Image (cartoon, rainbow, N blue to C red):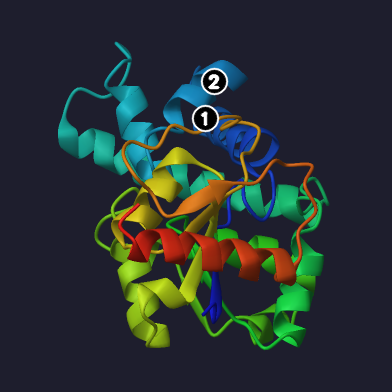
């Protein structure tokens, strides 16, 4: 039986990547005097590396003008990431990022139906704290029993650690939850934690390619979302899993 919705954030609750995080990274590069920039194509490539700090390090490995030593790179990454998060919060405050269609209504419907909810992301907590009040108001935490972010885990998605921690916090069996994700790494993380998953592809992940069997389905961006549909699909997914399909 479905008891809880586990929400990813970036790309799932809102299309934050292209016009939010990417822009904020470019502003951070300029602020620190770096002649670097990520266009939409390059940022799409880097999104397959989970985590902003990790993305920066991956990009530096391909740059001849990046600092030579690991210590210098780590120092630069820390300064860039802090600047980027400030710029991202400013973009959110300016109203540059909206919730994806149907998301906020589904959150409220789920709460009214008695479903528990949690934020299960590996983005920085400061990014969540910037976005969620803008979308849901200052009392947004009342909708969620747990908020797990990148600072709460040692390993980011597609590693299942954040889902394992969320299930432990909520004292739920994986089959009692439904993960809502937009990307392949997020879907893989949920799958590895044995949590049924609904994938709703985003701008940077228009199609998904999950290897092997997985407990979930793909919801087209234009499809309407409702608790009744989630319960029905969740039941079908868990039934298939129990039969080993």
Q: Closer to the camera, 81 or 46? A: 46
User: Which residue appears farthest toward the front when viewing the image?
Assistant: 243
Identify which residue is drawn at 46% across, 33% down: 47
The reply to whether residue 79 is in sight is no
Q: Is residue 184 left or right of residue 19?
A: left
Label 2 sits on residue = 37
Identify which residue is drawn at 37% across, 35% down: 49
Label 1 sits on residue = 29
Quarter occupied by residue 131: bottom right
Residue 101, how many percent across, how many down?
81, 51
Q: Nearer the viewer, mark 1 or mark 2?
A: 2
User: Which residue appears farthest toward the top when viewing the image?
Assistant: 64
Identify which residue is drawn at 42% across, 55% down: 215
Q: Is residue 58 left or right of residue 126?
A: left
Residue 73, how many percent across, how many down?
26, 34
Question: Neighbour class for label 1 at 10 Å: few (<14), some, many (≥20)?
Answer: many
- Whether residues under marks 1 and 2 lie with C-beta atoms below 8 angstroms apart, the answer is yes
The reply to whether residue 189 is in sight is yes
Question: Neighbour class for label 2 at 10 Å: few (<14), some, many (≥20)?
Answer: some
Q: Earlier in the sequence, mark 1 or mark 2?
A: 1
Q: CA distance from mark 1 to mark 2?
A: 7 Å
Location of residue 28 with respect to 127 vertically, above or below: above
């Amino acid at each position: 039986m479905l008891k809880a919705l586990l929400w990813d954030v970036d790309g799932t609750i809102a299309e934050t990547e292209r016009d939010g995080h990417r822009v904020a990274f470019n502003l951070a590069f300029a602020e620190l005097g770096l002649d670097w920039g990520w266009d939409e194509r390059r940022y799409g490539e880097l999104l397959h590396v989970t985590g902003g700090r990790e993305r920066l390090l991956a990009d530096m490995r391909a740059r001849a003008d990046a600092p030579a030593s690991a210590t210098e790179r780590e120092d630069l990454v820390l300064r860039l990431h802090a600047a980027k998060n400030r710029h991202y919060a400013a973009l959110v405050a300016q109203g540059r990022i909206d919730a994806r269609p149907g998301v906020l209504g589904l959150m409220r419907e789920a709460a009214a139906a008695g479903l528990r909810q949690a934020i299960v992301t590996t983005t920085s907590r400061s990014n969540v704290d910037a976005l969620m009040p803008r979308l849901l108001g200052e009392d947004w935490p009342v909708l969620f029993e747990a908020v797990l972010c990148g600072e709460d885990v040692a390993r980011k998605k597609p590693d299942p650690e954040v889902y394992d921690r969320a299930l432990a916090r909520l004292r739920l069996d994986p089959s009692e939850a439904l993960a809502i994700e937009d990307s392949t790494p997020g879907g893989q993380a949920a799958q590895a934690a044995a949590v049924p998953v609904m994938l709703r592809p985003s701008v940077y992940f228009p199609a998904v390619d999950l290897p092997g069997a997985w407990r979930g389905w793909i919801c087209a961006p234009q499809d309407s979302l409702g608790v009744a549909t989630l319960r029905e699909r969740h039941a079908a997914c868990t039934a298939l899993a129990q039969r080993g399909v």
